[in-house]
């Protein structure tokens, strides 16, 4: 089951205090960008972020899962905990690279 557009809009609205937020549909699901860095993979109306060491303390005890077959285990964001979600994205944003530009 793919994500609903309502879920993606809610997720983007929640992240809007962090800057420019956009979504991109990819293979039936979505990736969410904040200030041009891909920070969230959204599948089946669940938001996933990379399981990086910098998030271990903040995300201790939170659920984990795989967004799709063959993906690495990721943290599942509880969108009802808005401040924690924003803090997690702030932390991870500094550690993630900008997408590589495509050569023409």
Image (cartoon, rainbow, N blue to C red):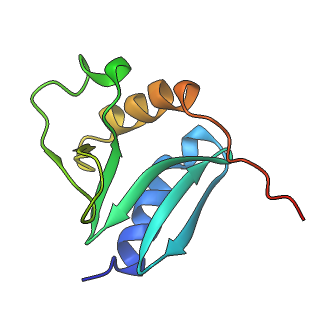
Figure check: 4 above or below 9: below
The structure residue drawn at horizontal position 65% and vertical position 43%, both measured from the top left corner, is: 19
The number of callouts visible is: 0
Toward which corner of the image does residue 17 lie, by quadrant?
top right
Toward which corner of the image does residue 98 lie, by quadrant?
top right
Indicate the quadrant containing the N terminus: top left, top right, bottom left or bottom right: bottom left
Question: On the picture, is 6 further left or further right than 59?
Answer: right
Toward which corner of the image does residue 22 lie, by quadrant?
bottom right
- 53 or 77, nearer to the observer: 53
Question: On the picture, is 2 further left or further right than 41?
Answer: left
Which percent across, then down, holds residue 15?
49, 48
The structure residue drawn at horizontal position 34% and vertical position 33%, both measured from the top left corner, is: 83
Question: On the picture, is 69 further left or further right than 9?
Answer: left
Figure check: 97 above or below 12: above
- 92 or 12, nearer to the observer: 92
The structure residue drawn at horizontal position 25% and vertical position 21%, both measured from the top left corner, is: 56
Indicate the quadrant containing the C terminus: top left, top right, bottom left or bottom right: bottom right
Q: Residue furthest right?
A: 104
- 11 or 69, nearer to the observer: 69
Figure check: 48 above or below 11: above
The structure residue drawn at horizontal position 52% and vertical position 75%, both measured from the top left corner, is: 25
Question: On the picture, is 96 further left or further right than 71?
Answer: right
Which percent across, then down, holds residue 46?
26, 61
Which percent across, then down, holds residue 76?
23, 47
């Amino acid at each position: 089951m793919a994500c609903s557009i309502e879920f993606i809009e809610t997720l983007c609205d929640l992240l809007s205090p962090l800057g420019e937020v956009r979504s991109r549909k990819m293979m039936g699901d979505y990736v969410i960008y904040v200030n041009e860095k891909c920070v969230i993979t959204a599948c089946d109306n669940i938001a996933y972020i990379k399981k990086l060491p910098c998030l271990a303390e903040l995300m201790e005890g939170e659920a984990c899962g795989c967004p799709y077959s063959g993906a690495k285990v990721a943290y599942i964001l509880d969108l009802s905990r808005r401040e924690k979600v924003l803090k997690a994205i702030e932390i991870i944003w500094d550690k993630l690279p900008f997408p590589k530009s495509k050569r023409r």
